[in-house]
Image: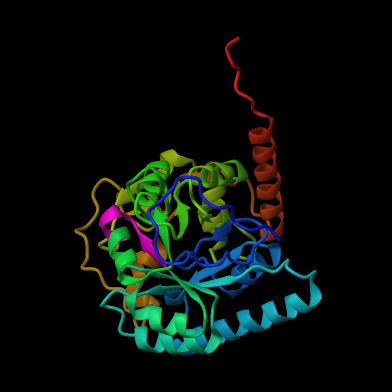
Amino acid sequence: MQEAPTPGPAAPAGPSRPPPLACRLPVFAAPMFLVSGPELVVAACKAGIVGAFPTPNARPIEVLDEWMRRITEALARARDEQAPGTVAAWCANLVTHRSNARLPEDLKLLERYKPPVVVTALGSPKPAIEVVHGYGGQVFADVTSLTLARKAVEAGADGLACICAGAGGHTGSINPFAFVSAVREFFDGTIVVGGGICDGWGVAGALAAGADYVYMGTRFIAAAESMAQPAYKQMVVDSTVDDLMLTDRLTGTTASWLKPSLRASGLDPDHLPEAPSRNYDSNRSFDAAKRWRDVWAAGQGLGAVQAVEPVALIVQRIEAEFQAARARFAAWQPALAG
């Protein structure tokens, strides 16, 4: 079992650094709307990376209860069947935006099923901290700016999921290297970085820059175990970064979308309707979230997705790339002037 390395850049002293998460590689299969479900989470954890899913994917609340039960039971069996230390931690991605009326019910299920890490999104991490810390878990906050990062640290988050330029879905605008460097100036906790990182070479580069873990979303959209529709998976395989666009016209928050999926839904990428008001209430049916359901998100890691493959094979390839990158670091020696 490989532990995430201590980041290089120094940072001011702060709260005790949380322990590393159990994982074979310092990678999260990032939580993706209508893509990440129990099968993807379990497959990721069994392959040795952190499996994550957004709680709004499970509607109504009874479905979320069922999903969390399935995940915990499947991982308990996997730990009995696999070699010790080969099954990674799992993660729930919780929407804490004020429009999410289901938040109290979600928190009760977190307390019951105890995911080792909870990533909060679209709001302060504060509502989750007491519950998650109460059972010994860690709370990371999804942030897209330094202002939000500072607020999350002040609220008591154990870590930050820094969503950078190049990420799919709700995305950021800061370069990953610049974001990590700036955050390390004031935060010595855990940093997960995401945005266009799609292979083991990128994982190594992110760790060298000071991150502890990497979010990979787009790389797993076309995984055999994902909930993405077959046409969505094939579109990810067939598309390039030129097929992406950023807009807030679909959800009210800037996100990265596949233009072919907009056209297939009868939308003109050059003449989209006005942005709706933001509403992230997990009590709403999926019919009420039609714009989110019928158009498909992706990030700039599209080019690494060449086929629909099982998670285990994807992780195996990422690990080989990561080890090759480590070997490259070890072999590099500066040429010194004589």
- Residue 43 vs residue 224, the one in the foreground: 43
> How many numbered marks are there?
0
Left or right: 164, with 80 as reference point: left
Task: Return the x and y of residue 96 as percentages of the image width and height.
Answer: 33, 75
Whether residue 147 appears in magenta in the rendering, the answer is yes
Whether residue 182 appears in magenta in the rendering, the answer is no
Can residue 15 be seen in this snapshot?
Answer: yes
Q: Above or below — where is 100 with respect to 177?
A: below
Task: Return the x and y of residue 140 as percentages of the image width and height.
Answer: 43, 67
The quadrant where residue 294 appears? bottom left
Q: Residue at x 46, y 57 (%)?
A: 191
The quadrant where residue 95 appears? bottom left
Split into 4 quadrants, where in the image is the N terminus? bottom right
Left or right: 105, with 82 as reference point: left
Q: Residue at x 44, y 48 (%)?
A: 10
Left or right: 39, with 135 as reference point: right
Can residue 226 be seen in this snapshot?
Answer: no
The quadrant where residue 306 appears? top right
Split into 4 quadrants, where in the image is the C terminus? top right
Q: Which residues are magenta?
A: 140-148
Q: Above or below — where is 112 with respect to 98?
A: below
Q: Residue at x 47, y 46 (%)?
A: 196
Left or right: 142, with 34 as reference point: left
